[in-house]
């Protein structure tokens, strides 16, 4: 048998051969068969859009489909398979090895040479292949032997080989909205051939909306939930909000602690606190914790925030962040969640300053890129007679012996950095007082 299977995506192991077979999952039976049935992603597949035109005209070039689960990446690939005159082959990066891919590409090269026909190669979860493995696609993509369709839930900027990415058009698929998920569910309830219409279910619109909320933009999750609800309804064949609420008690939030969503939520938490929005801060904190994020990771981010974005404008913030970390360590979860919430809310309403952060960056840049001058002699300790004879400690003035605790005129930076200002406090919070104090310290001695 040839490696090529034109216009078809091989069924998964265990699936019935016919797409409408009743023993196939509802989500598989309801998968759109035409672009007109496709729900969502209208910026990509609405009539007249470039991607749709390319599919309909069979002029597709290599693309990367990037989006959350259940948004239509595999469905789009299947629709392309039915529309193209090219050979179409589908692989899963989870189930297939690079050896199989290389065999397919060799046959694609031969087919292009003999017949002039291209091969469209669909790689689901392409991010599962490492960058070196992805390199194997490049020669055949560049030669025009294959058109690559890669599907991924991860940011292609980080997970797809840059050379391959530069030769592909990235299309971003967004999580489906409540009206779109509800429409998909209603179609499944009413469709007598592929869906559940023959069961004559009684389903409230409110129940469908509740399922759509549970699905978090994932059509597959929504349809799987609906199928479970039908089983739970039994002979009553009634699905209402009470049944949905009962089934949804153990809802798993959309969150991948190692993926992009992890960093998106961390960023949202950090920027909400920075913008002095306690409501947004506690919301994003709850999103992370309720999804199972490591509370000590959150605590570390809050400690970092306290010094990076508050600093000396409110020095108490760092103490509170560290105390929250200790509370979480002592109490564990879920009891430690309020300690983190207290710290997040405190820092959201605290005076903000990045003066400490900027001071360190400037000092680090100077330390790394400029001449590393020796420590001035007057700042060096002189524990031995030899060192004293070399003028170590000469002309050092003990600050506590000065009238206001400052040895004015004694430079503590090396000569090339003398007079340089790394720390520039703001007028906010405690830093307003610090700024005033520094102005007094820096006065030219009388």
Image (cartoon, helix red, strand yellow):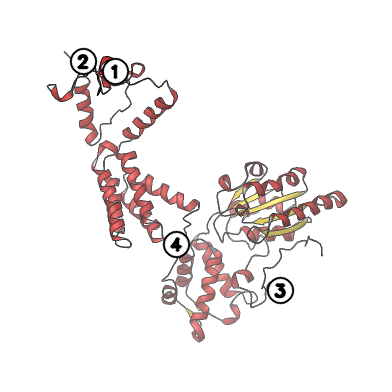
Give the labeled residue for mark 2. 444
Marks 4 and 3, Cα distance to the nearest angstrom?
Answer: 33 Å
Marks 2 and 1, Cα distance to the nearest angstrom?
Answer: 23 Å
> Residue 35 occupies which quadrant of the picture?
bottom right
Marks 1 and 4, Cα distance to the nearest angstrom?
Answer: 61 Å
Q: Secondary structure at mark 1?
A: helix
Asked if residue 168 shows in the view, the reply is yes
Counting residues from the start of the chain, the first of labels 2 and 1 encountered is 1
Q: Secondary structure at mark 2?
A: loop
Q: Secondary structure at mark 4?
A: loop
> Residue 46 occupies which quadrant of the picture?
bottom right
Q: Is residue 31 above or below residue 377?
A: below
Give the labeled residue for mark 1. 377
Asked if residue 48 shows in the view, the reply is no
Residue 195's tag is none
Q: Residue furthest right?
A: 114
Name the image quarter holding the C terminus.
top left
> Residue 365 occupies which quadrant of the picture?
top left
Give the labeled residue for mark 4. 253
Marks 2 and 4, Cα distance to the nearest angstrom?
Answer: 61 Å
At 36% across and 16% down in the image, what residue appears? 416
Q: Residue furthest front?
A: 385
Q: Does the CB distance between marks 2 and 3 fall below 8 Å?
A: no
- Which-is-in-front pick, marks 2 and 3? 2
| Horizontal and vertical percent position of residue 32 | 64, 65
Give the labeled residue for mark 3. 18
Counting residues from the start of the chain, the first of labels 2 and 4 encountered is 4
């Amino acid at each position: 048998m040839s490696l090529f299977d034109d216009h078809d995506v091989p069924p998964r192991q265990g699936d019935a051969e016919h797409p409408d077979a009743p023993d196939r999952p509802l989500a598989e039976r309801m998968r759109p068969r035409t672009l007109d049935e496709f729900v969502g992603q209208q910026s990509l597949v609405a009539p007249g859009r470039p991607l749709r035109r390319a599919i309909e005209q069979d002029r597709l070039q290599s693309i990367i489909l990037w989006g959350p689960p259940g948004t239509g990446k595999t469905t789009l690939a299947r629709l392309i398979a039915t529309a193209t005159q090219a050979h179409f082959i589908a692989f899963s990066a989870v189930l297939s090895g690079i050896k199989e891919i290389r065999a397919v590409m060799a046959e694609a090269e031969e087919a292009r040479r003999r017949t002039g026909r291209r091969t469209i190669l669909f790689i689901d979860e392409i991010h599962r292949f490492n960058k070196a493995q992805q390199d194997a696609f490049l020669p055949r993509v560049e030669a025009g032997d294959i058109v690559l369709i890669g599907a991924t839930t991860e940011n292609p900027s980080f997970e797809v080989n840059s050379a391959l990415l530069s030769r592909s058009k990235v299309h971003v698929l967004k999580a489906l909205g409540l009206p779109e998920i509800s429409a998909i569910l209603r179609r499944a309830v009413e469709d007598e051939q592929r869906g559940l219409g023959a069961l004559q279910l009684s389903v409230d619109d409110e129940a469908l909306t509740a399922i759509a909320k549970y699905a978090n933009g994932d059509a597959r999750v929504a349809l799987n939930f609906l199928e479970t609800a039908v089983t739970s309804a039994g002979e009553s064949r009634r699905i209402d909000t009470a049944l949905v609420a009962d089934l949804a008690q153990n809802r798993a939030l959309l969150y991948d602690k190692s993926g992009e969503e992890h960093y998106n939520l961390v960023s949202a938490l950090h920027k909400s606190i920075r913008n002095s929005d306690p409501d947004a801060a506690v919301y994003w904190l709850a999103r992370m914790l309720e999804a199972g994020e490591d509370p000590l990771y959150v605590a570390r981010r809050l400690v970092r925030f306290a010094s990076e974005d508050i600093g000396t404008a409110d020095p108490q913030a760092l103490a509170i962040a560290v105390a929250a970390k200790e509370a979480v360590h002592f109490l564990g979860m879920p009891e430690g969640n309020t300690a983190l919430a207290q710290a997040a809310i405190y820092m959201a309403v605290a005076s903000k300053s990045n003066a400490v952060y900027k001071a360190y960056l400037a000092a680090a840049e100077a330390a790394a890129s400029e001449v590393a001058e020796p420590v001035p002699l007057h700042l060096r300790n002189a524990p031995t007679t030899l060192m004293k004879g070399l003028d170590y400690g000469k002309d050092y003035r003990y600050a506590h012996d000065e009238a206001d605790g400052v040895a004015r005129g004694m430079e503590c930076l090396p000569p090339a950095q003398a007079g340089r200002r790394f720390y520039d406090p703001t007028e906010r919070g405690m830093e307003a007082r610090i700024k005033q104090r520094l102005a007094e310290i820096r006065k030219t001695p009388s």
